[in-house]
C-alpha cells in the first residue's frame, strides 16, 4: 500500500511540475500575442492612411491592352 501512495506522490509532483511549465509557456505566448496585436493595429492604421493617397506612378487609365 505504501508503494502505491509513494507512486501517486511521485506522479502528482511530476504533474505539478508539468503544469507549472505549461503555465509559463501560456504566459509567454499571451505576451507575444499582445505584442502582435499591437503591431497589426499599427500596420492597419498605416494601410488605412495610405489608401487615400494615390500610389506613385499610378493613373486610373486602363492598361494598353484594354
Image (cartoon, grey):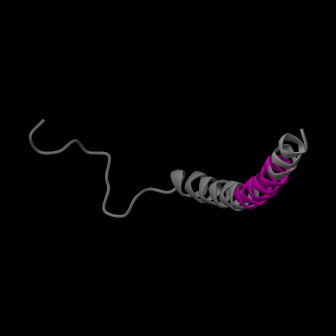
Query: Exactly how many numbered labels are in the figure?
Result: 0
Q: Quadrant of the N terminus?
A: top right
The one nearer the camera, 63 or 36, is 36
Q: Is residue 27 magenta?
A: yes
Residue 40, by quadrant, is bottom right
Tell me where residue 50 appears, x and y as whole percent.
Answer: 54, 57
Q: Residue at x 65, y 61 (%)?
A: 39
Q: Residue at x 84, y 43 (%)?
A: 8
Tell me where residue 65 appears, x and y as whole percent.
Answer: 9, 40
The one nearer the camera, 10 or 65, is 10
Q: Residue at x 76, y 59 (%)?
A: 21
- Is 52 drawn above or below residue 65 in the view shown? below
Task: Please tell me whether the stretch drawn in magenta is mainly helix, strand or loop.
Answer: helix
Q: Is residue 60 magenta?
A: no
Is 27 on the left or on the right of 59, as rendered?
A: right
- Is 11 drawn above or below residue 20 in the view shown? above
The one nearer the camera, 16 or 10, is 10
Tell me where residue 13 appears, x and y as whole percent.
Answer: 84, 54
Looking at the image, which residue sits at the far left? Answer: 65
The one nearer the camera, 52 or 13, is 13
Q: Residue at x 11, y 45 (%)?
A: 64
What residue span does the magenta drawing correspond to? 11-29
Residue 47, by quadrant, is bottom right
Tell me where residue 52 appears, x and y as whole percent.
Answer: 54, 51
Amino acid at each position: 500500500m505504501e508503494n502505491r501512495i509513494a507512486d501517486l506522490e511521485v506522479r502528482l509532483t511530476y504533474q505539478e511540475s508539468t503544469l507549472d511549465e505549461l503555465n509559463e509557456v501560456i504566459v509567454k505566448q499571451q505576451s507575444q500575442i499582445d505584442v502582435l496585436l499591437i503591431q497589426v493595429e499599427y500596420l492597419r492604421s498605416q494601410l488605412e492612411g495610405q489608401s487615400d493617397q494615390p500610389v506613385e506612378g499610378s493613373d486610373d487609365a486602363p492598361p494598353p491592352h484594354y
